[in-house]
Amino acid sequence: MDITKIIDPLNDAQRHAVTAASTAMLVLAGAGSGKTRVLVHRIAWQIQVEGLSPHNILAVTFTNKAAREMRSRLEELLAIPAQTLWIGTFHGLAHRLLRRHAQTAKLPATFQVMDSSDQLRLIKRLLNRLNLDEEKWPPKQVQWHINAQKDEGIRARHTSETGDPYQRQMLAVYRAYEDLCDRSGMVDFAELLLRAHELLRDNPDVLEFYQQRFLQVHVDEFQDTNTIQYAWLRLLTQDKDNLFVVGDDDQSIYGWRGAKIENLYKFQRQHPNHQLIRLEQNYRSTGTILKAANTLIANNDGRMGKELWTDSGDGEPISLYAAFNEQDEAYFVVERIRAWANEGGARSDVAILYRSNAQSRQFEEKLMATNTPYRVYGGLRFFDRAEIKNALAYCRLMSNRNDDASFERVVNTPTRGIGAKTIDDIRMIARDQEISLWAAAVALVNQGNLSARASNALKSFLLLLKQLADETEGLALYEKVKLVVEKSGLLELYKQAKADKGEEKVENLEELVNAARLFDADTDNEDNLGELDLFLAYAALEAGDMQADEFEDCVQLMTLHSAKGLEFKLVFLVGMEEGLFPSQQSVDDAGRLEEERRLCYVGITRAMRKLYLTYAESRRLYGRESYPRPSRFLREIPAEFIQEVRIRGNISRPAATIQPKPKTTMTTGTYKIGQKVSHEKFGEGIVLQMEGQGAQERVQINFKQVGMKWLMLAYAKLNIIS
DNA sequence: TTGTTCCAGCTTTTT
DNA sequence: GCTGGAACAA
């Protein structure tokens, strides 16, 4: 037993937290104060010193990345694999519970996990079926509403019908959505948490089993937990005081998606005997950066209180650059990065952080122009790509024929002559008989009142899936996926697709087969569940982390939100302007403004050695020139820490952009403006405009019956009415 | 089916 | 001002 390895690398506060006797513990861990280290060493301590079996420990994180990091650091410290230790994300662990107890949780064994885009599509279909206008009921809003309800642990049946018409309609949609999910065996992300909570709450034997198993429970980023996540933790631990949570109220930046900073206070109330430990020594940034961050965050009310410090000196002052416009801002940042790289700095140590994704473009352009390698975070993820989703949809249908979303996705992909009309018929039957699209399709074929062509096309699809299911029986997972990719015709489809994009898609499909191979190899599958279902869940739950060229030395571009938890030697915090950061939508609400301030705090504390703050005096936004005021956060940082950069003279003023609009050419053809014409389909109308020449010649006509239309003269059969 | 035109929307994001 | 998706013409 090597205790020194566990406690020697710790400072006093950290050691205190790690070695405390089992108790409810709240570790307030400031940015860069070694919070992961405390978690990992705490677990190691419990195993090696207190003799707890890894089997008895649960550790919960928010991201897969954090979970992986924790596991690998723990295995390194303990020098043994820690397989029986449950480390995972809230969603991953909830999924695991539901797979194990699918029947008890009233789920089919082959239930499928939907990601947000699947969910959105399902909601769109549902609204359509309920004859609700998407204008009045924006699918995004409905989705947000449903998820928010679930995050609070509220089911449709918990809400009474008494609200205003809007509430009542929302409730009806929520209820219909629940029905649809249940019927088709689909589970969205919020449902994973809610259902796992209900599983424990309503089944005392299951609850007791896990309560006895998990003698110690650890939670990372506790300030980001929402209501249902905390309720789930409460069930597992009750009042046993075996809950060890690490968090930082000053870094709570996910309130807008249901995170409850109040859970920190709730935890304190519910565990009167808890210990509170503050980690305030920072091992990341210079004294100047920390003092700036401390002063800024002190403007927030109701903090738990914490002041970061370091013993490694003040370092350089923070630089502030007032750019002429957003072009100049990008130019300045890229020049500084080039200077950094020329002096031997690694580009991967540099980050450009912005409030909203839309800001990345100007930097990308300048980086590209100077041949500086860069990487933008937050793009399309591997498992989100259309070709991958299509392939997975076939897999999902193989496993669960009731998966309507997948059915719609691939019933005519690649095209096999099943048109909108046929699909509409299928939908109709499905709605009338309350059955899945698949079952409706089967019924439609059997009825036989379908045109021969449509019937054959549909039959071929049904047959294809049956064949896939038969032929993949007993094959290894990756062979299944491989066969699906080939036999479905997807591979062929993308091979024939127009040169550029098709090739990439073919490669992605091959990569998918490869991912399946790897998944097969390193999943121990202790629960012996359907490997295909597990792979599909993995694809939904771990959509990220398959981004290419991670190893190239490149500048990192990302939003402030995705920068949380990371650190860089050189950080540019750009777009420090009122209306942008803090964002316009936040300035009128004290609570949201405080969250913006915390976001700024997060941004500042990412910097290890040098921080640049920039703003533009003029910025083009949404096609409009604006002259924003510098962000209030700049004023909240004491001037003594800031040095203004003055390098005026080579301002890159935009050349006055006078772009001649393409003139609409007036053709002197048969038609004149004001001419009365008639069209065999659209009826009578009046010519309003003309453009183009020869085969491209078009006319705009205002038809009495159908309104405004552009028609190609080469095709449209028009008659002049004199 | 495919290409085009039109039109709304426009923080932040993981799972 | 740009972009993604829907609607529409051919």
Image (spheres, coloured by chain):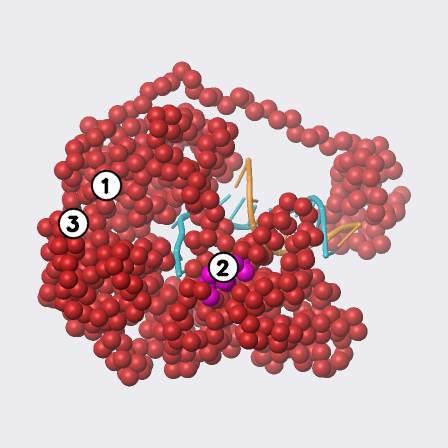
Chain colours: A red, B cyan, C orange
Q: Same chain for marks 1 and 2?
A: yes
Residue bearing the label numbered 3: A9
Mark identifier at residue A515: 2
- Choose the circle earlier in sequence order: 1 or 2: 1
Label 1, label 2: how far apart the Cα atoms are: 36 Å
Q: Residue at x 68, y 74 (%)?
A: A463
Disc 3 secondary structure class: loop
Residue occupying the far bottom of the picture: A205
* Labels 1 & 2 near each other (Cβ < 8 A): no
Please state the horizontal and vertical placement of residue A553, each as a whole percent of the image.
Answer: 41, 38
Label 2, label 3: how far apart the Cα atoms are: 37 Å
Residue nearest the viewer, comparing A53 with A365: A53
Amino acid on which disc 2 is placed: Ala
Check if residue A489 falls in the magenta segment: no
- Range shown magenta: A512-520
Disc 1 secondary structure class: loop
Residue bearing the label numbered 1: A284
Check if residue A516 falls in the magenta segment: yes
Amino acid on which disc 3 is placed: Pro
Label 3, label 1: how far apart the Cα atoms are: 15 Å
The disc numbered 3 marks a residue on which chain? A
Residue nearest the viewer, comparing A423 with A567: A567
